[in-house]
Image: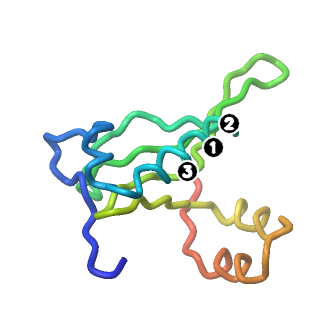
């Protein structure tokens, strides 16, 4: 992965399934399985959007649900970016969420990664 460049950095060229397929090459099958798994878990991949701060097109995975009172809620789960031959999923958690993640039944290695990861201020 070293030396690979992030793709879809031209503001005027929105990612399409064909462009994604061409950029991922053999990895496109894995990408399709990833999307299918998301859908099975109730996570939607949002439309691609160009972000000025990172100068790239990103998509966002969101979990949507309706509360018992009928309120529609949305929780961003991850950001998706495309690279030469692979895709990357990035997570950004607040300190409160980090504490909750550490209580999950995950490996010590994963907990160490969570502890070392920078957090975002909750807005």
| Numbered label attached to residue 21 | none
Q: Quadrant of the N terminus?
A: bottom left
Task: Mark 2 vs mark 3: give the one in front.
Answer: 2
Disc 1: CA contacts within 10 A as few (<14), some (14-19) or many (>=20): few
Q: Position of residue 42 (x, y in %)?
A: 67, 34
| Numbered label attached to residue 37 | 1
Residue beneath disc 2:
40
Disc 3: CA contacts within 10 A as few (<14), some (14-19) or many (>=20): few
Measured along the vertical axis of the image, is residue 65 above or below residue 90? above
Measured along the vertical axis of the image, is residue 27 above or below residue 13? below
Residue 54 occupies which quadrant of the picture? bottom left
Quick check: marks 1 and 3 in contact, CB under 8 Å? no
Q: Position of residue 5 (x, y in %)?
A: 25, 69
Residue 91 occupies which quadrant of the picture? bottom right
Q: Secondary structure at mark 1?
A: helix
- Label 2 to label 1, Cα distance in Å? 5 Å
Q: In the rendered structure, which disc, 2 or 3, sits on the residue that comes first in sequence?
A: 2
Relative side of 68 to 19, left or right: right
Check the image and tell me how it is coloured. rainbow
What residue lies at 27% left-to-right and 44% top-to-bottom?
A: 50
What residue lies at 59% left-to-right and 49% top-to-bottom?
A: 77
Task: Mark 1 vs mark 3: give the one in front.
Answer: 1
What residue lies at 23% left-to-right and 55% top-to-bottom?
A: 55
- Label 2 to label 3, Cα distance in Å? 30 Å
Q: In the rendered structure, which disc, 1 or 3, sits on the residue that comes first in sequence?
A: 1
Disc 2: CA contacts within 10 A as few (<14), some (14-19) or many (>=20): few
Q: Secondary structure at mark 2?
A: helix
Quick check: marks 2 and 1 in contact, CB under 8 Å? yes
Residue closer to the observer: 55 or 30: 30
Residue closer to the observer: 21 or 90: 21
Residue beneath disc 3:
123
Q: Secondary structure at mark 3?
A: loop
């Amino acid at each position: 992965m070293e030396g690979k460049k992030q793709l879809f950095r031209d503001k005027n060229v929105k990612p399409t399934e064909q462009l994604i397929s061409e950029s991922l090459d053999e990895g496109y099958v894995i990408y399709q399985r990833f999307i299918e798994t998301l859908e099975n878990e109730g996570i939607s991949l949002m439309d691609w959007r160009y972000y000025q701060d990172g100068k790239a097109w990103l998509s966002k995975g969101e979990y949507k649900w309706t509360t018992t009172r009928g309120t529609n809620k949305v929780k961003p789960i991850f950001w998706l970016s495309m690279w030469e031959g692979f895709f990357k999923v990035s997570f950004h958690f607040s300190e409160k969420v980090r504490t909750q993640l550490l209580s999950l039944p995950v490996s010590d290695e994963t907990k160490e990664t969570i502890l070392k990861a920078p957090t975002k201020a909750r807005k």
